[in-house]
Amino acid sequence: MIKRNFIRTLAVALALGMLAAGARGADLKDAKQIIKKSEAYALSIDSYSYLVKGEGWDLNAAETAKRTSVVAGEASQKFGAVKDLAGDIKKDADNDKGKSEPVFKRYKVLYKFKKPYLLQMNVIMSEYVPKIIYGSLMTYRPDNDPEVFWFKPKISPMAIKRPINSESGDMLYAVMSLNYAMIEAMSKDAKPVFKGIAKVNDRDAYKVEFVFDMEKKKHKPYAVNFKKFGIPKEAQKKYEDEVNGYENDPTKSVMFYFDKETLLITQRETFDEEGKLLGRKIWSDIKVNELTEKDF
């Protein structure tokens, strides 16, 4: 009897598991349905980690040079071992402040997240920052102090406390929910369209595209539902600025790629009016619900 009940319970559990997997992974062709199912699953995840690889045109090279100058200046003051190198980087950055030509850049980071908003980012490489920042670890624990994050360069045994609105605070909007907030904003300007299936990370992925009317794209910034996406007030400004960034740049279209099995977003591409690539982000090695607070 006990054995029979166990087998029946196991069969029901397996059936429910297959239904859940099927709900996420079955062939879908409706863009809105893909987005809805993807968002529901993504926002239900308690913790995740992934590798982010990005490339694209830095359309604000002068502003990037300004930020680089600030970071290099701080490094030259706080880390004697790289004082001369950091000083040279600062001089080069200062010389580049007046340049306005777009520059194609790449970066690679490891990222961790756990609810409510614990963050950690390891900068493997980034052409947006000085090389002395490579290998640095940034950690945000708002449960301890929401006004600061900790920055630990590879060259230092100690982490440095920095204000959350400082130059290196871009880690605040690298969370998974950002894509869905962007989709909500873009849906006010364009209708999502299913564009077939492509390979991302050697896996099938659904393609969903937004194409904008350039004359109508610029409007009042979209007000993000911070409660829905669980964004603390200290991160809200940077988060909302990033969500609305597409409105004021040359972006004509955006393509999102949803992993066919998990439905999580694994790639995002932006293009200009001539169809030229402006930027691409790829999320890989995604692991969900494996982290604890001790990992931050």
Image (cartoon, helix red, strand yellow):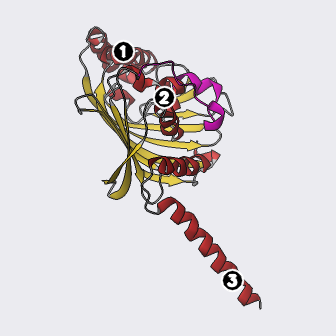
Q: Residue 17 in the image: x percent, y percent?
A: 59, 69
Of 8 and 2, the residue lying toward us: 8
Three-letter amino acid code at the position of disc 1: Glu
Q: CA distance from mark 1 to mark 2?
A: 19 Å
**Which quadrant, please, contains the N terminus?**
bottom right
Identity of the residue drawn at 55% across and 29% down: 150
Three-letter amino acid code at the position of disc 2: Val
Mark 1–mark 2 CB contact (< 8 Å): no
Membership of 15 in magenta stretch: no
Residue linked to disc 1: 63
* Mark 3, secondary structure of its residue: helix
Can residue 148 be seen at all in this image of the molecule? no
Q: CA distance from mark 3 to mark 1?
A: 63 Å
Q: Which disc number belongs to residue 282?
A: none
Q: Mark 3 or 1 closer to N-term?
A: 3
Image vertical order of residue 55 relative to residue 24, above or below: above
Mark 3–mark 1 CB contact (< 8 Å): no
Q: How many residues crowd mark 2 within 10 Å: few (<14), some (14–19), many (20+)? A: many
Image vertical order of residue 44 relative to residue 90, above or below: below
* Mark 1, secondary structure of its residue: helix
Residue linked to disc 3: 8
Three-letter amino acid code at the position of disc 3: Arg
Q: Which disc number belongs to residue 243?
A: 2
Q: Is residue 143 left or right of residue 136?
A: right
Image quadrant assignment for residue 15 = bottom right
Start and end of the magenta stretch? 217-238
* Mark 2, secondary structure of its residue: helix
Q: Residue 66 in the image: x percent, y percent?
A: 37, 13
Q: Nearer the observer, disc 3 or disc 1?
A: 3
Can residue 186 be seen at all in this image of the molecule? yes
Of 35 and 149, the residue lying toward us: 35
Q: CA distance from mark 2 to mark 3?
A: 48 Å
